[in-house]
Amino acid sequence: MVHKFDTLGVKCALDVCSGTVHILDDISFRMLDFFDEEGNFNLEEAKKADCADEKCMEAVEELKELKEKNQLFTKDIYKALVAHKEKKSVIKALCLHIAHDCNLRCRYCFAHGGEYMGKREIMSAEVGKKAIDFVIRESGARRNIEIDYFGGEPLMNFEVVKEITEYAKQEGEKHNKNFRFTITTNGLLLDDKKMEYINENMGNIVLSIDGRKEVHDKVRVRVDGSGSYDSIVDKFIKVAESRNQENYYVRGTFTRDNLDFSEDVMHLANLGFEQISVEPVVAQETEDYALRKEDLPRIFEEYDRLAERILEARKNGKWFNFFHYMIDLHESPCAYKMLSGCGAGHEYAAVTPSGDIYPCHQFVNDPKYKMGDVFEGRIDMDIRDIFVKSNIYTKEPCGDCWARFYCSGGCAANAISMNKDINKPYLLACEMEKKRVECAIAIKAREALDEE
Amino acid sequence: MKHVKTLNEANLVNSVENGGCGECQTSCQSACKTSCTVANQKCEKKGKRGR
Ligand code: SF4
Ligand code: SF4
């Protein structure tokens, strides 16, 4: 399968199954239309369309040559790997819900004020340690294990975070496991001491900030309704600096209220942040801030605009990274990874304050998806099966989707919450994902052309 | 080539042989928490996989 697109003023062809990207001129871009799915050129059609002169045929020869080199019209040979994935996958990453409580009441929060439709609760060190024992056991031969301290707001229970971290390091040494920690925070309770501990121990920190003050403060409010921007922004700048502008993310959400979100990304970049992630809100369309189908053209335009602004900034010597435009065309993940996606429910699981296990943070407190608890330390294989057996070949639209190896089938939680079926991806998210992948590739193409 | 410029020589097909170690980060962990893009994940064997 070949996907051709014209984005940011460059014409590209992505050979979907090899991952090869070609920059095309107008003629070769046009001539691609006369190849079928298998890569056979149809001369008759080309002649009929008056596209068979010497130049056209020269381009056709080049395209044929790429096919010979397995860089165009490559076949999808990966279905056979699915069995490997089903057999081999083990839980190697946990999202620990350190506190089901929060000191903010962000309007779009999927945890609804940190409570996840349950009660306010914090995790005990005992539950946390049991979770560590559980993942050490479950992870089999895997050496690298990830722990993400999540909430609600994990800094509301930081002593327990430290206790679990120390325990994991100690047990990791005993069992030859390399633990890597991430913490996500809204920043309100961040102070120098916590920052120091986090910098010493955690490979990643995710700092929640939405961008411009007025955008942030409209949504990310305290219990009394006041905005939180002024209390966190200086602290976040300090965190970023203290980590040499690496191994962290400022992470924002855009909604229907700020479809001009490139302004928010640029605001964060202008504050000096170099690792930026601003993502579309995921919400039922009944919410007034939810993104809708009719917003897509505007969103696409904004993604283009953002890409242009990133290119321009970089040209002027100001480098920053936008999470969803990050793509490594030379050292991308392997095919196995491309098939396994997020791994929710079989490589990755979430643990609640009371020790219950769910496929991921978005399923927490949905009784249908409770997989077990850390005390018993076993997981429900039927639920695991739902997740491990779902992949780009079982999901309806993915098999024909050119973005399948970048997206790997989308978010299982979105599919289930929006379409009640893990194999029916949330199409609005698909459209945005595809646009982002096109932009990411086009940025690389533009940078390559500029280098010449 | 006159009409085409190829950006990368990487080939996903080759990764079938040398990939699948499973040591890399799970994709939702890094920043997003609401979607799954694997293309921007790092391979742990960077440079060793021969792609
Ligand atoms: S963009 Fe949608 S259709 Fe395409 S692979 Fe992802 S989930 Fe599947
Ligand atoms: S199901 Fe969605 S939210 Fe859950 S881990 Fe996967 S991508 Fe992330």
Image (cartoon, coloured by chain):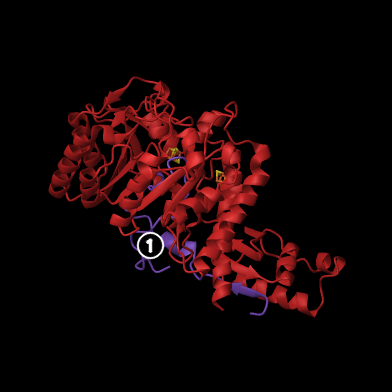
> What shade does chain B have?
purple
Residue at left 63%, top 35%? A292
Residue A371 horizontal/vertical position (percent): 34, 28
Q: Is B15 located above or below residue A63 in the figure?
A: above
Residue A143 horizontal/vertical position (percent): 24, 51
Residue A250 horizontal/vertical position (percent): 40, 48
Q: Secondary structure at mark 1?
A: helix
Residue at left 41%, top 24%? A366
Q: Is A257 located above or below residue B24 in the figure?
A: above
* Image quarter hosting the C terminus of chain A: bottom right
Q: Chain of mark 1?
A: B
Name the residue tied to disc 1: B18
Residue A66: which quarter of the image?
bottom right
Is A405 in front, or is A237? A237
Q: For residue A17, say whether it is visible.
A: no
Residue at left 63%, top 64%? A12
* Image quarter hosting the N terminus of chain A: bottom right
Ligand 1 sits in quadrant: top right
Residue B47 horizontal/vertical position (percent): 36, 68
> What shade does chain A have?
red
Q: For residue A14, say whether it is visible.
A: yes
Label 1 sits on what residue type? Asn
Residue A187: which quarter of the image?
top left
